[in-house]
Amino acid sequence: MTQAVKACGGVLSKTMYTKYDAVILGLTAAGYDAKNVAGYDLTKPLSDYDGAVAQGLNGAVYALLALDCGNYPNDIRDQYVDYILSRQLKDGGFAFSGDNADPDITAMALQALAQYRSRADVSAAVDRAVNCLSKLQQDDGGYASWGAVNSESCAQVLIAMCQLGIGTDDARFIKNGHSVLDKLLSYQLGDGTFAHLENGGSDASATIQALTGLTALLKFQKDGKGIFTIGTGDTCSLTIRCDTLLDSSNKDKLSAAKQTLVPKDGIILSEERVPFEEGQTVFDVLKKELQSRNMQFEFEDNALSGPGYMDGICNLYEFDCGDLSGWMYSVNGTFPSVSCAQYKLSAGDKIVWAYSCNLGADIGDTYMGS
């Protein structure tokens, strides 16, 4: 992916912005930061509202999902939400075109709106759309789109239900004892793949969407969250700096080779908001972010300092600037007494990794420096 992005100069498409959405969703799910792929910010084009909605309703839906999946900073979200609301039909559903609600795009719109239900207008719109989806469900638990009963419609509805916190046993989505999950599984073939139509052959698109729907259900059953809430739960911020090495008295202690590694402003990573899962530690976040940016680091399980002891970041190591030098971390301005691999994060925590040349005294750790 990095090579492909480099080859196109970070321009995935000049007209089809959903290509950015797809790549952002995939990279974020894999644990990468879509704001820095081979040096390119793939979320930046989504600030172009006109360009995104030029594709229609699906352009706004997937732009919103892409931004939200990694909690990527952007103040354009409300515009996308308003656009989606403006396209709601009288019956509560949504459609690519025309006045007849389509289950696929209705489900997609619900997936995008789910996280904005604190807004009264969104909450009301979601209720109407859910009611519409319930009415569109057929007697066998399935759905028809564009004149054909198909598996992909079931998958999209299942994803929307999970995103909204609606279980597969919800009475609104049970018809004659059949759930949308029952119908989706009826399309699975002997080799494990899924068919697009009943009695049809193996279909790649149908299989991908079915797997997405089933993955959404597994995630919902595990933690009560939808598949597109990968990075929209808890977030913290991360900063990495070595500005102490800019001081002439410290810089002179570095070898000539090491001096070239120090950024001109001493900032290796400006404050970055990043998602984390419940139970993760400062070390988990640092490791993931450094790996996603292909930034060098080395750590060890130190008997004295505990697991996850950071020996070096970006080839700047402890003792490079004297016997009292090395990396230290703080959370919300305080230097914890436990190792970074033992410090569990809370929402909103501000993590700063800083290179100290004097056992912390020069970066604000008065306890260690005293």
Image (cartoon, rainbow, N blue to C red):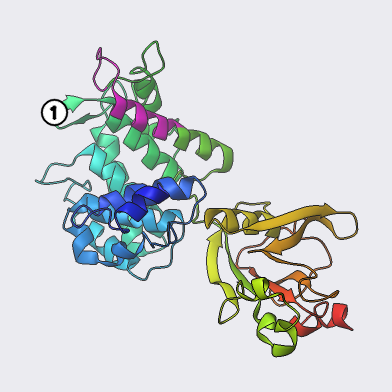
Callout 1: SS: loop
352 up-or-down from 107: above or below: below
262 up-or-down from 39: above or below: below
Find residue 83 and report its image quarter: bottom left
Residue 8 visible? The answer is yes
- Residue toward you, 128 or 218: 218
- Residue toward you, 222 or 15: 15
Image quadrant holding the C terminus, namely: bottom right
- Residue toward you, 264 or 341: 264
| Membership of 211 in magenta stretch | yes
Residue 68 is situated, as x and y percent measured from the top left of the image, at 41, 57
Task: Give the magenta range.
Answer: 196-214
| Membership of 240 in magenta stretch | no
- Residue toward you, 298 or 232: 298
Left or right of residue 254: residue 91: left
Amino acid at pointer 1: Gly
Residue 7 is situated, as x and y percent measured from the top left of the image, at 32, 52
Left or right of residue 24: residue 197: left
195 up-or-down from 216: above or below: above
Q: Residue at x 64, y 68 (%)?
A: 349
Number of numbered callouts drawn: 1
Residue 79 is situated, as x and y percent measured from the top left of the image, at 27, 67
Residue at the extreme left:
98
Left or right of residue 115: residue 308: right
* Residue at which label 1 appears: 147
